[in-house]
Image (spheres, rainbow, N blue to C red):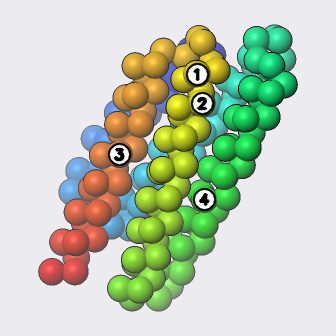
Amino acid sequence: MKNIFKLFLVVSVVAMLVVGCGGFISNSYKTMYTVGIAYDAGMRSVADLYSKGKLTKDQLNQVLAVASKVEKSYKVAVAALSVYEKVDSSENKDKLQVAIDEMVVIWDELKNLLTLFVPSVDSLELQKISSNIDNLVIKANFAMNKEVI
């Protein structure tokens, strides 16, 4: 289980190196990719712990409730990116940015639950993952503002 997070951490670092000076669309993709990988790794850990009896049904339900929000917000961000790619307008760009920001906020909520309920997950590793996501969002915001100028 820890190996999943270590693998993700390596992938996150590589993704951060690849971000570089990428544009808004590129950084949007990378942010969604990073959240998707983190979500998958976290949910695999939750499933493993629950199957071993290390999570209560109540804890599982709490995680699943927030995980459902992450999944929905991810789908909204994907849809917003698709619309923006088809119709490049400032309105669609703003909608995409709002969708990505919301997805990241909800990911942070899930990350906080995982930190509480998944004892085998090193809190520092989750902080690094979250920091990588935050950096991608900042770069996407910077690219968005840069493209407007």
**Which image quadrant for residue 43?**
top right
The residue drawn where x is 27% and y is 56% is: 139
Q: Residues within 10 Å of mark 3 (few under 14, many from 20)?
A: some
Q: Nearer the viewer, mark 3 or mark 2?
A: 2
Q: Is residue 148 above or below residue 62?
A: below
Most foreground residue, 14 or 84? 84
Helix or strand or loop: what does disc 3 sit on? helix
**Which label's residue is closer to the chain start, 3 or 4?**
4
> Taking 146 as reference, is 138 left or right?
right
Where is mark 3, residue-wise? 134
Could you tell me the amino acid type at mark 1? Leu
Q: CA distance from mark 3 to mark 4?
A: 16 Å
Could you tell me the amino acid type at mark 2? Leu
Q: What is the number of the mark on residue 116?
A: 1
Q: CA distance from mark 2 to mark 4?
A: 17 Å
> Taking 75 as reference, is 96 left or right?
left
Task: Pick out the residue farthest to the left.
Answer: 149
Most foreground residue, 54 or 78? 54
Task: Using the rendered image of the protein, determine whether residue 15 is visible from the camera's viewpoint.
Answer: no
Task: Pick out the residue farthest to the front.
Answer: 58
> Taking 37 as reference, is 93 left or right?
left
Q: What is the number of the mark on residue 73?
A: 4
Task: Using the rendered image of the protein, determine whether residue 17 is visible from the camera's viewpoint.
Answer: yes
